[in-house]
Image (cartoon, rainbow, N blue to C red):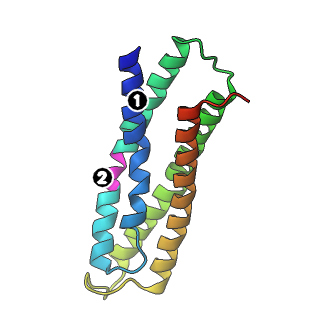
């Protein structure tokens, strides 16, 4: 059981962790070349939530099934809902906007890698960052629920 808990904790950290780094990558004040590189790095980081998050959910379900904890405990339901909301925001909102920005950057004629990002792209990055702040906050609440396991 301790090994399963260890697996669960590590995969949870790996699964949610990259969302905290995306804020650093997606800055509004950077050149087009820097942002293209940030988008590539962001795409690489997407692998971690897909694998780590999936393993975390599977190991979490196994932990609940093999322990006295009940699936109907409020902290379990809250954790699963938060995880689902995080995935919905990342997959349904952030990722499509990242792809849209990548396409816009590729289509912009005359925009050199050394040029600062235009205002409309900066506004889109700021919007993505707002969603990422929401995801980060939900991730913190998720970790709090998992650590404290409040009984309400």
Q: Which residue is mark 1?
A: 55
What is the total number of numbered labels drawn onto the structure image? Answer: 2
Q: Is residue 107 above or below residue 44?
A: below
Q: Which residues are magenta?
A: 43-47
Q: Is residue 130 above or below residue 14?
A: below
Residue at x-position 56% and y-position 53%: 137
Q: Residue 113 location in percent, x, y? A: 26, 81
Spatial CA distance of label 2 from label 1 is 18 Å
Residue at x-position 36% and y-position 66%: 25
Q: Is residue 2 above or below residue 77?
A: above
Q: Pointer 2: residues within 10 angstroms few (<14), some, or many (20+)?
A: few
Relative placement, left or right, of 139 versus 50 is: right
Please name whichever residue, 80 or 105, is drawn nearer the observer in this view of the structure.
80
Looking at the image, the residue that sits furthest to the right is 152
Closer to viewer: mark 2 or mark 1: 1
Q: Which mark is residue 44?
A: 2
Q: Is residue 105 magenta?
A: no
């Amino acid at each position: 059981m301790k090994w399963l808990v260890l697996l669960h904790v590590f995969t949870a950290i790996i699964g949610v962790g990259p969302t905290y780094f995306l804020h650093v990558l997606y800055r509004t004040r950077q050149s087009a070349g820097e942002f293209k590189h940030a988008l590539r790095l962001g795409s690489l980081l997407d692998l971690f939530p897909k694998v780590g998050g999936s393993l975390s959910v599977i190991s979490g379900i196994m932990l609940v099934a093999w322990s006295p904890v009940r699936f109907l405990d409020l902290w379990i339901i809250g954790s699963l809902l938060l995880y689902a909301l995080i995935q919905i925001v990342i997959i349904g909102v952030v990722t499509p906007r990242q792809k849209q920005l990548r396409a816009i950057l590729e289509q912009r004629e005359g925009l050199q890698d050394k040029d600062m990002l235009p205002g409309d792209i900066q506004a889109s990055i700021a919007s993505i960052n707002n969603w990422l702040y929401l995801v980060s906050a939900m991730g913190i609440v998720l970790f709090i629920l998992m650590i404290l396991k409040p009984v309400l």
